[in-house]
């Protein structure tokens, strides 16, 4: 039996923004090694807060 392969899903604009913010915060290595679930609540909240802030800024333009 072959090991299950994860399906590559297409990244949404929000996914792209999330990765960009994670990179800015220096979290990409941690995410690549252990996945998003390895982030602390503080780290996840920081990403979410910055995403919200950027979305609001785009809405004002």
Image (cartoon, rainbow, N blue to C red):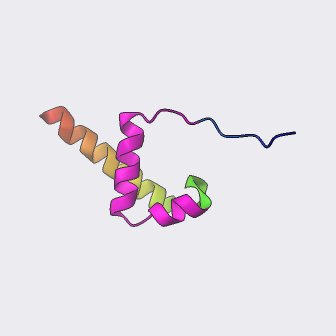
Question: What residue lies at 44% left-to-right and 64% top-to-bottom?
Answer: 27
Q: Residue furthest left?
A: 61
Counting from the top left corner in percent of width and height, residue 36 is at: 55, 54
Tell me: residue 1, above or below residue 49: above
Question: What residue lies at 36% left-to-right and 64% top-to-bottom?
Answer: 25
Counting from the top left corner in percent of width and height, residue 28 is at: 45, 61
Question: What residue lies at 40% left-to-right and 50% top-to-bottom?
Answer: 19
3 in magenta:
no
Counting from the top left corner in percent of width and height, residue 26 is at: 39, 67
Q: Quadrant of residue 7?
A: top right
Q: Nearer the viewer, residue 36 or 9?
A: 9
Q: Residue furthest right?
A: 1
11 in magenta:
yes
Q: Is 13 displayed left or right of 59 in the figure?
A: right
Q: Quadrant of the C terminus?
A: top left
Q: Is 50 displayed left or right of 60 in the figure?
A: right
- For residue 4, say whether it is visible: yes
Q: Nearer the viewer, residue 45 or 19?
A: 19
Question: Magenta stretch?
Answer: 8-33
Question: What residue lies at 25% left-to-right and 45% top-to-bottom?
Answer: 54
């Amino acid at each position: 039996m072959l090991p299950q392969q994860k399906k590559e899903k297409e990244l949404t604009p929000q996914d792209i923004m999330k990765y960009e913010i994670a990179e800015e915060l220096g979290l990409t290595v941690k995410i690549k090694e252990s996945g998003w679930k390895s982030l602390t609540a503080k780290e996840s909240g920081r990403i979410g807060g910055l995403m919200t802030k950027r979305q609001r800024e785009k809405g004002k333009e």
